[in-house]
Image (cartoon, rainbow, N blue to C red):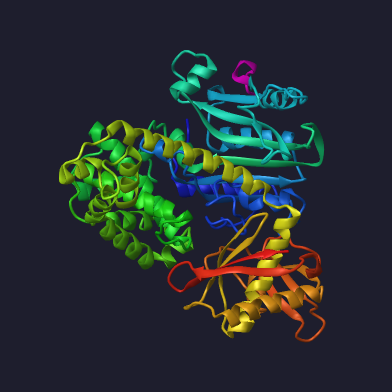
């Protein structure tokens, strides 16, 4: 008999289980990646921890556990079914060169069967089949059998199914072992692949054994240390444990679905209403968390994703007959969900008014569909007819349906062209998300580490030159340049830009040491270390100081940061600011490079 639990209880049980085995709880990282240009959002629990897999020492040691907030937009077109979500929570535990397969597999089995009361006969396990010079993972299969999983329920699958990484052409990687639950155990067994395809066998957990390094020759060499990365999606797992085929019937979603029923006057029981209601619930929950992370709707990057989610939700609201503005009330249902979020994520409570105001303002702006008609009229002045791409652009940007343009302007609607543009856009979104995620895990080259250190120098320099406290609001780093967002109410003068650039170069020329100490977060704040206003920090943190703390006035920069950084500023080369611009109300953005 499986345990009937809430999301909060599932998180608590997971945390308690691994804390009893020497793991330290770390808070969820921000949804916005720190100093990483290759991904718009954190989309997996491992993502914020990559530096520690690459050799950085974590303040809490080698055994960690948490629940990570994640956003994935690659499957946004599939949201509306019973299990795809844009925002989701990922339970995870990690071993950084500590325990390995034997411990992890035995703990996985015990958590599922003893804590969550899953019948061992209802478990199916997959292991790596072998290939490309890496042997079949018979070791993992043997350990599973030792736990009590029948041999006929252990399946060996190829690399495309049971292998993680490397994140780029080269890097750390390894086989994984996935756990599936038979949701219809009363039926006769079927072929495993067919069972997965039908949705009968549902994956709930994945243990990744990061034990290899793929080099430039394509060879897989054993790493000096073995690592563990795991992931258990809260939403999907909870539905499985509650015996539900539809994630949206769990206590995570029901308060939101009930509110949608209330404002629409329609029932979720009606089959034709389920998909629109799921999209509204998913997209507005995602929007709540993205806004809480410090993002506002815009036409670029994270802001564009947020705007797209809100507007897709509004369109679905129209489909089910909602006439008045409704995003505010649906968001309030997310924020007030006592059994799941209230009190667990402080940024939701702290930013409640801001979240509701931004959603309502964006919805009002989107309702003004006349802007889409105006855009269509403008395009028709330079061409005889609108292409499918034109119509799709207007639809995505202004929310004006092509049927409305056809009716208002009395033009022919290129339905096939519109659908083709929509399919291409969805495919590009999926590809971009996958590429960005891979790059994000790889984004710690020596050049990017230099840029990371340069952002610390830049923030401190701006504070000196502008004579005000400058808060970092985000950064974005590639191999070629850094982008630094900060709080400031106006455009910088050329003199101020030149002054900041000069000061950074002076500190580089002085070849100042970069030191790291681990201390309590409270102590770091008391000592004046800079923190991200939207950041969430554990009790113990790393503090990086640039300068000599023993010499009066020589600590130029002091920030709470996960790293990694160069050893001395002289490694950076010459710093050059190439652009300064606005990036929202009260925020500025600087682009710079190292020559």
Q: Nearer the viewer, residue 453 or 294?
A: 453
Residue 364 lies in quadrant: bottom left
Q: Nearer the viewer, residue 119 or 213?
A: 213
| Magenta highlight range | 148-155
Q: Say left or right for 10 vs 576.
A: left
Q: Nearer the viewer, residue 352 or 213?
A: 213
Query: Eyeballing the image, is 40 above or below 241?
Result: below
Quadrant placement of the C terminus = bottom right
Question: Count the marks: how many?
Answer: 0
User: Residue 347 location, x and y as percent?
Assistant: 47, 63
* Magenta stretch: includes residue 153: yes
Query: Eyeballing the image, is 384 above or below 134?
Result: below
Q: Say left or right for 217 vs 448.
A: right
Residue 125 lies in quadrant: top right
Identify which residue is drawn at 37% across, 37% down: 422
User: Residue 334 location, x and y as percent?
Assistant: 36, 54
Query: Eyeballing the image, is 555 above or below 59?
Result: below
* Magenta stretch: includes residue 293: no
Residue 79 lies in quadrant: top left
Identify which residue is drawn at 22% across, 34% down: 270
Q: Nearer the viewer, residue 440 or 422?
A: 422
Identify which residue is drawn at 57% across, 35% down: 205
User: Residue 215 location, x and y as percent?
Assistant: 78, 37
Residue 68 seen by the camera = yes
Residue 564 seen by the camera = no
Query: Eyeballing the image, is 516 above or below 114?
Result: below
Identify which residue is drawn at 48% across, 60% down: 293
User: Residue 382 location, x and y as percent?
Assistant: 30, 49
């Amino acid at each position: 008999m499986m345990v009937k639990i809430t999301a909060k209880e599932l998180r608590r049980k997971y945390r308690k289980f691994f804390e009893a085995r020497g793991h330290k709880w770390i808070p969820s990282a921000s949804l916005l990646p720190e100093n990483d240009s290759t991904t718009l959002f954190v989309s997996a629990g491992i993502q914020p921890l990559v530096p520690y897999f690459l050799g950085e020492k974590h303040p809490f040691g080698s055994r960690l556990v948490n629940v990570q907030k994640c956003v994935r937009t690659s499957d946004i077109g599939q949201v509306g079914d019973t299990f795809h979500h844009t925002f989701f929570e990922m339970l995870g535990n990690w071993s950084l060169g500590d325990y390995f397969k034997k411990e992890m597999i035995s703990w996985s089995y015990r958590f599922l069967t003893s804590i969550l009361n899953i019948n061992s006969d209802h478990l199916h396990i997959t292991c790596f089949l072998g290939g490309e010079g890496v042997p079949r993972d018979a070791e993992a299969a043997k350990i599973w059998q030792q736990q009590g999983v029948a041999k006929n329920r252990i399946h060996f699958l190829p690399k495309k199914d049971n292998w993680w990484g490397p994140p780029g052409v080269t890097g750390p990687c390894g086989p994984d072992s996935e756990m599936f639950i038979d949701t219809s155990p009363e039926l006769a067994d079927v072929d495993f692949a067919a069972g997965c395809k039908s949705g009968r066998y549902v994956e709930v957990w994945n243990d990744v054994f990061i034990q290899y390094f793929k080099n430039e020759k394509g060879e897989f060499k054993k790493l000096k240390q073995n690592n563990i990365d795991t992931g258990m999606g809260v939403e999907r797992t909870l539905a499985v444990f509650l015996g539900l085929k539809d994630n949206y019937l769990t206590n995570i979603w029901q308060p939101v679905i009930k509110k949608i029923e209330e404002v629409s006057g329609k029932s979720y029981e009606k089959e034709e209403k389920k998909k629109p209601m799921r999209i509204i619930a998913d997209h507005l929950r995602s929007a709540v968390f993205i806004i809480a992370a410090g993002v506002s709707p815009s036409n670029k990057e994270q802001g564009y994703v947020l705007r797209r989610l809100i507007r897709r939700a509004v369109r679905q609201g129209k489909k089910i007959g909602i006439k008045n503005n409704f995003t505010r009330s649906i968001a309030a249902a997310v924020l007030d969900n006592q059994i799941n979020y209230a009190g667990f994520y402080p940024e939701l409570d702290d930013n409640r008014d801001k979240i509701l105001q931004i959603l309502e303002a964006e919805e009002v702006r989107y309702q003004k569909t006349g802007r889409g008609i105006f855009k269509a009229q403008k395009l028709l002045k330079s061409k005889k007819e609108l292409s499918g791409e034109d119509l799709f652009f207007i639809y995505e940007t202004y929310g004006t349906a092509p049927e409305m343009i056809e009716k208002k302007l009395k033009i022919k609607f290129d339905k096939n062209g519109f659908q083709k543009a929509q399919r291409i856009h969805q495919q590009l979104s999926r590809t971009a998300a996958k590429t960005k995620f891979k790059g994000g895990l790889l984004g710690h080259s020596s050049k990017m580490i230099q840029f990371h250190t340069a952002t610390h120098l830049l923030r401190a320099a701006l504070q000196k030159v502008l004579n005000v406290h400058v808060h970092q609001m985000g950064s974005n780093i590639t191999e070629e340049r850094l982008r630094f967002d900060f709080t400031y109410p106006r455009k910088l003068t050329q003199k101020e830009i030149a002054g900041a650039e000069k000061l950074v170069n002076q500190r580089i020329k002085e070849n100042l040491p970069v030191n790291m100490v681990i201390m309590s977060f409270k102590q770091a704040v008391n000592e004046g270390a800079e923190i991200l206003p939207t950041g969430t920090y554990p009790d113990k943190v790393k503090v990086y100081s640039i300068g000599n703390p023993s010499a009066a006035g020589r600590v130029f920069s002091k920030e709470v940061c996960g790293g990694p950084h160069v050893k001395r500023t002289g490694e950076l080369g010459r710093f050059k600011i190439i652009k300064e611009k606005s990036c929202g109300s009260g925020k500025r953005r600087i682009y710079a490079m190292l020559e």
